[in-house]
Image (cartoon, coloured by chain):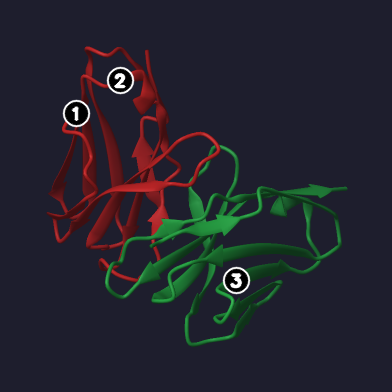
Amino acid sequence: GEDVEQSLFLSVREGDSSVINCTYTDSSSTYLYWYKQEPGAGLQLLTYIFSNMDMKQDQRLTVLLNKKDKHLSLRIADTQTGDSAIYFCAESMDSSYKLIFGSGTRLLVRP
Amino acid sequence: DTEVTQTPKHLVMGMTNKKSLKCEQHMGHRAMYWYKQKAKKPPELMFVYSYEKLSINESVPSRFSPECPNSSLLNLHLHALQPEDSALYLCASSQEEGHDEQFFGPGTRLTVL
């Protein structure tokens, strides 16, 4: 079955690193995504990783994938107040292009 | 132009009204999507159009009727909605239906009285 889980809330101090975690159940996931949603706005794709990769780095963002544990994480270095938002992980499979979203993690960055 | 626009931003309607949500993109994308997002929940896929043809209908009630009049426009016609249909309705588009990046619009916040 398809199920994606995230912790609901994370609070960090400005300048610290943030790590947002996600677990998924379907081992046939092909692509895994991280989206950001600011209040009252749509979703913005931050980064994605293919299931045959372990890590992807893009400026302040680092995605780690542990296929054995079906665990995905997003690390944001030097977190800024503008990073405060809800972060969704999502998966899709080759058999279905449908995006399955996690419940979202609300990141609060304290000055 | 890398933007998906949606109108209106907010909509309040009664259960007997008929209204439409509109979505537009000029990126040449051939796949367009409607999602429904309830408060504090993730988006849920409703419909996918690929090359102006309905590709996926996620068992959405018939009171929601999608329409894709051309490759740039996507409408969602609403009729006889229920209060539980109140939500943020998000439109997205991608180059093709598949794993291409989906660009999301800002959404229409719908309230059904």
Q: Amino acid at mark 3?
A: Leu
Answer few, some or many: residues within 10 Å of disc 1's Cα (few below 14, many 20 plus, some between 14 and 19).
Answer: some
Which residue appears at 66% of the width and 63% of the height? A21
What chain letter is assigned to the residue under label 2?
Answer: B
- Identify the mark at residue B63; answer none if there is no mark: 1
Residue A47 position by quadrant: bottom right
- The residue carrying mark 2 is B82
Which residue appears at 51% of the width and 56% of the height? A44
B28 up-or-down from A67: above or below: above
Residue B16 position by quadrant: top left
Answer few, some or many: residues within 10 Å of disc 2's Cα (few below 14, many 20 plus, some between 14 and 19).
Answer: some
Locate residue A88 relative to residue B9 in the image: left or right.
right
Indicate the secondary structure of the residue bearing disc 3: strand
Q: Are marks 3 and 2 on the same chain?
A: no
Q: Amino acid at mark 1?
A: Arg
Can the viewer see residue A60 in this picture? yes
Q: Nearer the viewer, residue B21 or A89?
A: A89
Which residue appears at 46% of the width and 35% of the height? B38
- The residue carrying mark 3 is A72
A97 up-or-down from B15: above or below: below
Q: Colour of chain B?
A: red
Answer few, some or many: residues within 10 Å of disc 3's Cα (few below 14, many 20 plus, some between 14 and 19).
Answer: many
Q: Nearer the viewer, residue A21 or A36?
A: A21
Residue A16 position by quadrant: bottom right
Among the chains pictured, the one given green colouring is A
Residue B91, position in %: x, y?
35, 46
Location of the N terminus of chain B by quadrant is bottom left
Locate residue A29 relative to residue A59 in the image: left or right.
left
Indicate the secondary structure of the residue bearing disc 1: loop
Gap between marks 3 and 2 measured at Cα = 37 Å
